[in-house]
Amino acid sequence: MTLPDLSVDLGRGLVLPNPVGLASGTAGYGFELRELIDLDRLGALFTKGTTLHPREGNPPPRVAEVRGGMLNAIGLNNPGVEHVASAYAPEFSRWSIPVVVNVAGGNVEDYLECLDRLERAEGLAGYELNISCPNIANGLDFGRDPSAAGRLVAAARARTGRHLMVKLSPNVTDIAAVARAVEEAGADSVSAVNTYVGMKIHRGIRAPVLPGRGTGGLSGPVIKPLALAAVAQVRQAVRIPVVGVGGIADAGDALEFLIAGADAVQVGTATFVNPAASLEILDGLTEIATRAGVRRLGELRGPDRPGVPPAGIEPASTG
Amino acid sequence: MIGPLSDLGRARDETGEVVAVEALEGGMVEITARLPRLATTARPGEFAQLRAWAGVDPLLRRPFSVAWTAGELCSFVLEAVGAGTRLLVALRPGDPLQALGPLGNGFQLDPAPGRAVIVSGGLGCAPFPLLVRELRRGGCAEVIVMSGAATASRLYPAERFRRGDDGVRVVEATDDGTRGRQGLVTELVAGVCDEATAVYACGPNPMLAALAQTLQRLSHPPRRAEVSLEAPMGCGFGTCLGCALPAAGSGWFLCCRRGPVMEVSQVDWPGLLALPPAHVA
């Protein structure tokens, strides 16, 4: 029995060896997880959101657990683009895992300056534009407004020949409109979705657990049905590849995102619970594909006959 | 100056069998499990991320200091304060326990101090049985445990700090005077400190802040003073950036990678005391 080909061509030179990546903000820049797991087996590493200047992040508490998920308000704590380009990128070029740098900013100029600095670094597989971080002032503006998102992406497109992915915010009225706008502006792919705005209340102090506005980004299994719906909507709206992310905890979850229309997936919060979660999901997907007898990943998406899943695929998950 | 990042190279994820769950007075529970890898690699003050349930509620693991090791066995001291700890204290012998560790930076034992003063407040006892043993093995002649709690039932049993080593002195204090000296345990520290002393502390933040202040006023401060801190943690290995605590000077440090053990001078104590109450584990 030959192993199925799980590679995913996302376009403009970004070919993932397999569809399982690590989501931005849950894997740092790879250095910690590299000590714990065989990182190079994975499809891609999407780095922590990187900004023009270093950021210390928000005051604690920064995380709060909720039923089936967690809230975070980290505040884009990162060492800044100069450090990433000069100290981290040379390391990335020695790794076989493709490293996609997630870029965040408060205005168009910040993003472009970030990209310019990263363009001079080798070892990067592409960029994921974070137009949707809910934890910094103005961070949502690009993600909410299709024309603003389009202008940002068009400007970024003019600066780089590398793969340009755009991470979409789910905290919008019409995610499909934003997806179409960034596709038209030249994005090579989109990832969907970032965290949902949420809040946890501390009953004792009669106030939110998280400081400031009291809100944070909700992630984990609790958002999976929401993320699946967003991925399906985005899939209908654009022709470019879609990377699905949101609450994926096992291979069955990943399969559901592929069925919803994703070409690849990112594993996020599950890594906090189990640093090897992404590898287990990759192994599980490989087993599913092998048992289903498919040659390529995309074939997992459609049933052999209407309503009849291919052999070896569980008809539905309980989660 | 903030210390080095912890070594993640020794950390492994291992599942072992619970062999004993001992209920102590006052709600504290000591859980012992067969975790051979952790038992042979953990150093005093390091912690493990524990999980003993399937499913997604609770979702995250819970961090606990390694309290004791013996052969293949590892012990943790905890109490039920939230959903995760309630499930952990309900474990029975034979149940599986998953542990990722050792994690974090532990206590500095090298070079061995002439005298070690351990300041323990309530559940802050957790890292100290192992520290006491390793200090004595490292040649520390005098180990004094200052064990404090609100009331007698909240004191970790003195014998569990000593574990058969009669050379270890345990001095107790309670806020209400129900056992030992009445008053704060930190008030006892000044009388036993000199330049040859190392101080190790763990307990509620107000106790640690009071200790920091006491030490600052000493004319002969200890050669080393370290505290073990806690913070709400997402991952425990430095990728979620959730466990930030205020650093002396400015900014934050990650409790899981720079700590949980910190030099007293590295912590912004007023900043730590000003933090809102964290959600319970």
Image (cartoon, coloured by chain):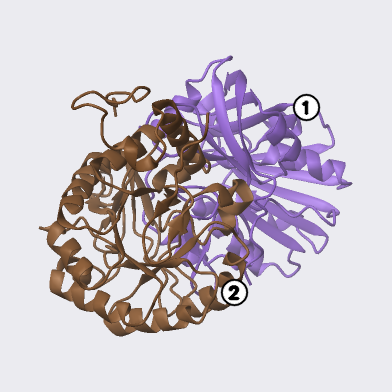
Chain colours: A brown, B purple
Relative to B122, A258 lies left or right: left
The structure residue drawn at horizontal position 60% and vertical position 53%, both measured from the top left corner, is: A34
The structure residue drawn at horizontal position 22% and vertical position 57%, both measured from the top left corner, is: A239
Q: Is residue B142 above or below residue A311?
A: below
Question: Which amino acid type is shown beneath numbered disc 1?
Answer: Gly
Which residue occupies the foreground of this view, A299 or B210? A299
Q: Is residue A296 above or below residue B69?
A: below
Relative to B218, B253 lies left or right: left
Q: Quadrant of the C terminus of chain B?
A: top left
Q: Is residue B29 above or below residue B255?
A: above
Q: Chain of mark 2?
A: A
- For mark 1, does the 10 Å Cα neighbourhood hold few (<14), some (14 to 19), or many (20 or more) residues? few
Q: Position of residue B18 (x, y in %)?
A: 60, 20
Which residue occupies the foreground of this view, A85 or B86? A85
The structure residue drawn at horizontal position 51% and vertical position 27%, both measured from the top left corner, is: B26
Residue B170 is drawn in which quadrant? top right
Counting labels gives 2
SS at mark 1 in the image: loop
Residue A87, numbered label? 2
Q: Position of residue A169 (x, y in %)?
A: 23, 59
Q: Chain of mark 1?
A: B
Residue that carries the numbered disc 1 in the rendered image: B71
Q: Position of residue A36 (x, y in %)?
A: 61, 47
Which residue occupies the foreground of this view, B245 or A96? A96
Relative to B194, A63 lies left or right: left
